Image (tube, rainbow, N blue to C red):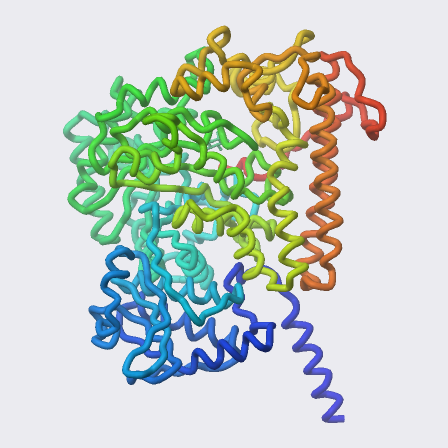
């Protein structure tokens, strides 16, 4: 009887161990599945030598012990004498043993946050050293080492020196104080302001671990559509509690500043940035913040955009506004990230031209600790956009990249879309600012113009869903932001490969298949949503699903019809000299390629040109047939993704397998919805048939137009 009970217990434990809700993200530390490799790892690591007492080094040590215990199935105790097959972690400052390893040349390249990992010999003993100039560097090194084990790499001849290419690597949370998340599709905000500062949710610590593991070093915890309450004493105490959690992980906290806060919580009559009382108010407020959070990172500010207050309310410039904050932050080492996402309520000008028009003339007008944060494209995180022309146009001003991880326009958290290819496409784009090779990446890291501030931010896709991001694959986009901002030279395939191995395991078939799914997913989505350069044709307000017919918004440039301009002749937005001349904002070399309908890459065709329906495409099809082809190809790709995923049933735990399977089914349904409704609608202009051989839409255009989603998520204030 006892035996049977034990057996049952064994099976229950096995089953529970196999269930996986995704909470552990890519830090799963499962036992290494390859027996030979496991034996090798165990031989190579028999103990840990560690030096230092800071919270960061303790975090590194804890992570290493936890990781090794999971991966190698053994407990590792710490030793304070050197022995063979030891992992040695520390900094030259904190340990004479580490100092004696003579790694100065490598460490000189690792900077403040980077690390060195090498196999070395010390006093006849073979060791692996994970070393940094700082304790945070060591922590990053430990996470990298655990990544090597999780992805089953050889650790016999390690010689790694790694330093981040981008200085500020940030998540931007659009989280409101009432815990709704603007454009958030993974539940409510993870910040429980009500129970802070007294209650520290384990999630905050796991959030910090996850970020540190991929090198993210800053979190803006509040929405850019800001609420001044966060700046009150009561909330600053809560902010301080979060900052204390983040600090050991090398993560600084940042806030969003509501420009009108001096009026709203300061009882002043104005928020004019040149007014002495206003300046003093912000200076006092910032000094107060630093009393709570001595390493406060600074402010991210959305001003004079979509109804937010800003300096222009007082006839002042963006530079006047940003510099006021910058002056008060500078003595403390804080920075201002001022967003360029502006477009005016009054101006009838092509919306895409407005950010450049406002910011380019201000180049050189900003203080040293100001960066302008620019969305990757000129519009608003569409499935595909050309790079923003501000990159390459402001050589005297540091520009930070803003990507959107949360899938506002990319299918919310029900669509599997791996964004690394989107991010890389922008980074690799050539601005021609200083001739060929002036890529966006070089603008971003400051190397093109000799600037020292550099930054990359992702609008967070994190919520309090058990697996953090709603869709399990949303985790890969969070992961990508960290890895790319550390090293933008990593390829999409490398990032996908790392993430898959850590998240699902190292089985060849599994890795290869998920890899195919991920790498094809972004193009699939572009095809079933907005092929050939179409943009902004989604549902109004909530942005859920297609609504290319929508024309009732209060502003013209919130209407899909404004963007696609379909008529009986053709479709697309003419942004050449004959149209809005938006193209003049790019370098002549870039403009030249895009302005000629024959050289314009087809993926941007309708972004820049109004093209006749019968225009002959590279495939030989006319535009209408090509559009049909792309929309159908998009749906076909999702169906292939489904098949590929289904082939993995035995290789993925049941819980995560089923989650993804269900979501792929939703994605397929919605891809068909996008395809059918867009084609039926555009057909009313082209008057051409959907080519023979394609499955015909099973609903009418009227049916699609009448769909209504009063409770679509993400719109919360
Ligand atoms: C935070 C888009 C989104 C808004 C968002 C805005 C921005 O317009 O729909 O929800 O507001 O971008 O980036 O500021």
Evaluate whether residue 689 shows in this view.
yes
Picture mark count: 0
Instruction: Give the image location of residue 572, x and y in percent.
Output: 59, 16
**Foreground of the two, 359 or 518:** 518
Instruction: Give the image location of residue 313, x and y in percent.
Output: 30, 20
Instruction: Give the image location of residue 336, x and y in percent.
Output: 28, 38
Residue at image position (60%, 45%) is 519
Residue at image position (56%, 48%) is 474
**Foreground of the two, 499 or 250:** 499
| Image position of 586 (left or right of 395) | right
| Image position of 583 (left or right of 679) | left
Instruction: Give the image location of residue 673, x and y in percent.
Output: 73, 32
**Foreground of the two, 292 or 670:** 670
**Foreground of the two, 265 or 48:** 48
| Up/down of 471 relative to 537, above or below | below
| Quarter of the image with the N terminus in it | bottom right
| Up/down of 520 relative to 350, above or below | below
Image quarter for residue 320? top left
Residue at image position (31%, 61%) is 137
| Image position of 230 (left or right of 603) | left
| Image position of 449 (left or right of 598) | left
Evaluate whether residue 176 shows in this view.
no
């Amino acid at each position: 009887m006892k035996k049977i009970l034990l057996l049952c217990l064994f099976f229950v434990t096995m089953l529970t161990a196999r269930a996986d809700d995704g909470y552990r993200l890519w830090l799963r530390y499962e036992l290494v599945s390859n027996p030979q490799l496991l034996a090798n790892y165990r031989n190579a690591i028999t103990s840990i030598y560690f030096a230092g007492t800071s919270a960061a080094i303790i975090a590194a040590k804890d992570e290493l012990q936890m990781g090794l215990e999971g991966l190698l199935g053994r407990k590792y105790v710490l030793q304070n004498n050197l022995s063979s097959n030891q992992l040695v972690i520390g900094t030259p400052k904190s340990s004479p043993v580490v100092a004696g390893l003579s790694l100065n040349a490598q460490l000189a390249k690792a900077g403040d946050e980077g690390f060195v990992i090498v196999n070395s010999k010390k006093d006849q003993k073979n060791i692996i050293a994970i070393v940094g100039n700082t304790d945070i560097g060591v922590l990053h090194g430990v996470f990298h080492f655990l990544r090597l084990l999780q992805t089953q790499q050889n650790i016999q001849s390690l010689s790694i020196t790694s330093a981040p290419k981008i200085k500020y690597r940030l998540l931007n949370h659009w989280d409101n104080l009432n815990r709704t998340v603007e454009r958030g599709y993974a539940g409510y905000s993870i910040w429980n302001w009500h129970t802070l500062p007294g209650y520290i949710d384990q999630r905050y610590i796991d959030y910090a671990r996850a970020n540190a593991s991929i090198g993210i070093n800053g979190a803006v915890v509040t929405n850019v559509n800001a609420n001044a309450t966060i700046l009150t004493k009561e909330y600053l105490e809560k902010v301080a509690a979060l900052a204390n959690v983040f600090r050991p992980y090398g993560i600084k906290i940042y806030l969003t500043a509501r420009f009108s806060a001096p009026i709203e919580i300061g009882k002043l009559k104005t928020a004019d940035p040149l007014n002495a009382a206003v300046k003093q108010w912000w200076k006092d407020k910032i000094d107060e913040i630093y009393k709570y959070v001595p390493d406060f990172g600074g402010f991210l500010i959305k001003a004079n955009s979509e109804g937010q207050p800003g300096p222009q309310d007082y006839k002042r410039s963006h530079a006047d506004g940003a510099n006021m904050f910058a002056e008060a932050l500078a003595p403390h080492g804080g920075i201002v990230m001022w967003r360029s996402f502006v477009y005016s309520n009054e101006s009838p000008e092509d919306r895409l031209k407005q950010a450049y028009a406002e910011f380019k003339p201000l180049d050189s007008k900003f203080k040293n600790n100001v960066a302008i944060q620019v969305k990757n494209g000129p519009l608003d995180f569409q499935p595909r956009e050309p790079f923003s022309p501000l990159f390459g146009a402001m050589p005297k001003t540091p520009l930070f990249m803003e990507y959107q991880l949360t899938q506002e326009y990319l299918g919310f958290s029900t669509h599997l879309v791996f964004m690394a290819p989107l991010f890389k496409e922008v980074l690799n784009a050539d601005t021609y600012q200083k001739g060929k090779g002036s890529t966006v990446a070089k603008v971003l890291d400051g190397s093109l113009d000799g600037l020292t501030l550099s930054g990359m931010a992702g609008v967070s896709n994190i919520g309090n869903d058990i697996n953090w991001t709603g869709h399990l694959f949303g985790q890969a986009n969070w992961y990508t932001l960290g890895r790319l901002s550390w090293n933008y030279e990593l390829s999409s395939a490398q990032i996908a490969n790392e993430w898959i191995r850590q998240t699902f395991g190292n089985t060849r078939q599994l890795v290869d298949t998920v890899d195919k799914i991920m790498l094809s997913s972004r193009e699939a989505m572009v095809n079933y949503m907005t092929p050939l350069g179409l943009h902004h044709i989604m549902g109004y307000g909530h942005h859920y699903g297609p609504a290319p017919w929508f024309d009732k918004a209060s502003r013209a440039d919130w209407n899909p019809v404004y963007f696609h301009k379909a008529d009986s002749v053709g479709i697309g937005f003419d942004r050449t000299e004959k149209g809005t001349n938006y193209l003049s904002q790019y370098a002549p070399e870039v403009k030249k390629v895009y302005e000629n309908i024959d050289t314009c890459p087809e993926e941007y065709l309708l972004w820049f040109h109004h093209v006749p329906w019968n225009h002959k495409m590279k495939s030989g099809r006319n535009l209408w047939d090509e559009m049909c082809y792309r929309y159908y190809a998009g749906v076909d790709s999702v169906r292939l993704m489904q098949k590929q995923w289904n082939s993995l049933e035995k290789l993925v735990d049941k819980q995560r397998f089923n989650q993804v399977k269900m979501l792929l089914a939703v994605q397929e349904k919605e891809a068909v919805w996008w395809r059918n409704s867009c084609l039926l609608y555009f057909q009313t202009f082209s008057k051409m048939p959907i080519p023979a051989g394609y499955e015909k839409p099973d609903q009418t255009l009227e049916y699609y137009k009448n769909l209504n989603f009063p409770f679509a998520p993400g719109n919360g204030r």
